[in-house]
Amino acid sequence: FYNALVGGQYSGSSSSGQKRKPIGASKPGTDAAPPASSSANAATPSLFISLVDSVSGQILHRVSHAHALASDLTEGAASTRVPVVISENWVVYTFFNQRTRRTDVGVLTLHEGMIDKNGITAFSAPEQEVSFSSLESAKPIVLSKTFGLTKAVTAVGVTTTKAGISSKLFLFGTANDQVVSIDRRMLDPRRPNGELKESEKMEGLIRYAPLLPIVPLKTPSHMYEVSSVQSISSAPANIESQSLVLAHGGPDVFFTRLAPSKGFDLLPDDFNRGLLSVVLVGLIVLLNVIQRMNKKKMVTTVWS
């Protein structure tokens, strides 16, 4: 799993503030089967999420949720479709929780194994297998956590960049006709429940909170209404910092360009290009003057 390629992007190791660290695992041929089955009891329906190896056919992991529905019955006809997206070694899905009367966001991350806190340094690294076999290799370790969202969700997507260097944003099409984005760090199942340790702060982990905040300034659709979003697709742009996002499926089609890690490879709009040109021209003139002075000095030294 360690050096597997998914969608042409490398999924490396993810560190942890704990004493042991999970190694990121991106397993080719892993599918998420959203509604494996549902309970016959209408009062407390259940949802089963199964990770299936499409090569060997074995179930890698299964998680169940009680009081689950695919959609909120109060907002229209019931749906049997569970929004789900797979990104590298991450699986994100949503469902409506009848008990809490809100949308729950489930997150699963697959990891090859656990290593010591000093297992990855500048001088050492864990052993990596060049090849992987679905029939022989061990099953991945799965970390999971559930978060709450105040809006009903109709579609889930994720940003994609050219080289996979930029951080990722998970995108949610909501029932109130908006497309909202949430940073992947907010969905990290490794978020600690207690006070953050110094190592966890250095890593950038955020303390666990049951509800995911929806920040209006980070809503891609802004003031526009995007009705009945059923699918969110993304594609990389020509530069690494940009991702092209398309939300569609209903009467509206919404397209935008996002920068998950901001425009780290772009010059700002207020960049003084004139001053830069003057400095470059001055350096070229100064270099020519110095070369001539050096040449003249060498000639004078030789004749003397």
Image (cartoon, helix red, strand yellow):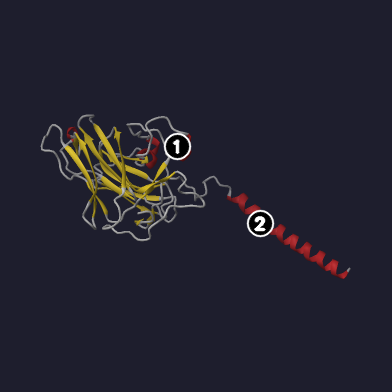
Judging by the rendered image, the residue that carries numbered circle 1 is 200
Q: Nearer the viewer, mark 2 or mark 1?
A: 1
Q: Nearer the viewer, residue 200 or 267?
A: 200
Tell me the quarter of the image containing the C terminus. bottom right
Q: Amino acid at mark 2?
A: Val
Q: Quadrant of residue 292?
A: bottom right
Q: Quadrant of residue 218?
A: top left
Q: Nearer the viewer, residue 210 or 52?
A: 52
* Percent of width and height locating residue 180: 33, 39
* Percent of width and height locating residue 301: 85, 66
Judging by the rendered image, the residue that carries numbered circle 2 is 281
Tell me the quarter of the image containing the N terminus. bottom left
Q: Nearer the viewer, residue 74 or 213?
A: 213
Q: Quadrant of residue 191?
A: top left
Label 2: how many Cα within 10 Å (few below 14, some 14–19, many 20+): few
* Percent of width and height locating residue 154: 24, 41
Residue located 42% across and 30% down the image? 195
Q: Visible in this render: residue 186?
A: yes
Q: Secondary structure at mark 2?
A: helix
Residue located 82% across and 68% down the image? 299
Mark 2 to mark 1 CA distance (whole Å): 48 Å
